[in-house]
Image (cartoon, helix red, strand yellow):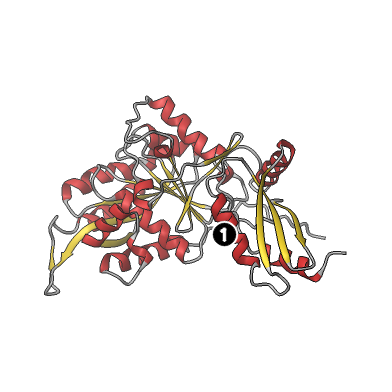
Amino acid sequence: MPSPVVDAVHRALNGVLDPELRRPITELGMVHSVDVDDDGALTVVVLLTISGCPLRETITGDVTKAVERLDGVSSVQVKLEVMTPEQRQALKDQLRSSTGGRGIPFNDEGSLTKVYAVASGKGGVGKSSVTVNLACSMAASGLRVGIIDADVYGFSVPQLMGINQTPTRVDEMILPPVAYGVKVISIGMFVTGNQPVAWRGPMLHRALEQFLTDVYFGDLDVLLLDLPPGTGDVAISVAQLLPGSEILVVTTPQSAAADVAERAGAIALQTGQKVAGVIENMSHLVLPDGTSMEVFGSGGGRNLASRLSSTMQTEVPLLGSIPLDVALREGGDEGSPIVLDPDSSPAARELSRIAGQIGHRPRGLSGMKLGVTPK
C-alpha cells in the first residue's frame, strides 16, 4: 500500500507542468516512480522524452520545489531517465488523440482555436512587434496562445521574444519553445547564426505545412501567424492550409503605407477569408509636455478600415491606434514585450486593449457537431 507521503507527493506532482507541453508530468506518464525511505529521503524518477532534453534542469527544479516542503520529506533526489521507444510512442499517440491525430488540428470541425494571420502591405510597419505583444498580452490574461513566425525570409519573432532555445524533437513531432506562456515556432530556430534562408515558393509552403502538422501546440485558444509583407506565396499558402483564418492588417498612418496595406487585406476577396480588423501602428508620438506629434501623418488606419469595409462589403473595424514608443523598441531589442507591464506606457495599454478585443472575441458554434443525441 502506498504511504501517505507517497500519495502526497503524487498529488503535488500533478501541479508540475512539462515546460514545453504545458501539461502535468503525471498526465504525460513522465513520473516513473516515487520512493520514500524511513528517514523521509524522497527519490523521484522522471522520464524525459529524449536524452538531450534542453529543459532537464527546469524539470528537476520544478519537481524539487513541488515536493521538498511536504510533511514527511527530509530530502529530495530527482533522477532523470529517458523514455523507451514504446513509452515515447504512447506519449505521441496520447498527444495526437487530443488534437485529432496527424494533420492540421486547427482545421478540425470541433476546433475552437481562433487563427489570425497578421499581415501588412510593406515592411517596417511593426507587424512582428504587434504580433508578439498581442500574443503575450493574451497569454497573460489566461488564454493559451501560439505564434507561427511565417516570415521565413525576415524571421524576427525569436529575438523579440528572447528565445534562444531550439525546439525539442520527439521523433517526427516538434515541441515548440515557450516564452511568457506563448508557444513559438520559427524557421529562425533551425538556422545557424544569422544565416539567410533562400527558398522558392514550394519550399515556403512545405515549411508552413510542417509547422502546422508536425509542431505540437496542444489545445490553443488563439494562434497568431506573423506573415511576411505583401501578398506572396506565404499569404496564399496560409489561405490554403488554414481556410478559416482571419486577417489582421497592420499599417502606419501614412497614406502610402495604407494604400499598400489595402492590398494585403483585399486578398481576402480572392482567398475567401475574413478581415478581422485594422491596427494602426506608430499613430502619434506623445511629447514630454503631453501633446502629440503625428510623425507619419494621420488617418491612415481609419481610412484603410473604411476602404476595406467597402471592398469586403462588411464592416472591418479599426481595432486601435498604437503610439510611437521608445519602450516598444527597447522591449523588442531585449526580448521583453512591453505588455508584460500593461500600465507602463500608452503603447502597452493600447496593445493590451486590442489583445482583449481579439482574444476574447467569441467564436460561433454554427455547423459544429455538439455530440448530443435527442431521445
Q: Nearer the viewer, residue 73 or 375?
A: 73
**Image location (x, y in percent) of residue 130:** 33, 54
Image quadrant where residue 103 sits: top right
- Whether 8 is drawn above or below 223: the answer is below
The number of discs equals 1
Q: Amino acid at mark 1?
A: Gly
Which residue occupies 55% across, 46% down?
Answer: 106
**Image location (x, y in percent) of residue 344:** 30, 70
Q: Nearer the viewer, residue 226 or 312?
A: 226
Q: Residues within 10 Å of mark 1 (few under 14, many from 20)?
A: few
Which residue occupies 27% across, 42% down?
Answer: 121
Q: Quadrant of the C terminus?
A: bottom right
Image quadrant where residue 120 sits: top left
Judged left or right of residue 261, residue 216 is right
Q: Give the residue at mark 1.
A: 61
Residue at the extreme right of the image, as rendered:
1
Q: Is residue 308 visible?
A: no
Judged left or right of residue 96, residue 331 is left
Judged left or right of residue 286, residue 318 is right
Which residue occupies 41% across, 62% down?
Answer: 137
- Whether 72 is drawn above or below 186: the answer is below
Q: Nearer the viewer, residue 202 or 328?
A: 328
Q: Secondary structure at mark 1?
A: helix
**Image location (x, y in percent) of residue 325:** 22, 62
Image quadrant where residue 348 sits: bottom left
**Image location (x, y in percent) of residue 38:** 80, 67
- Whether 314 is drawn above or below 266: the answer is below
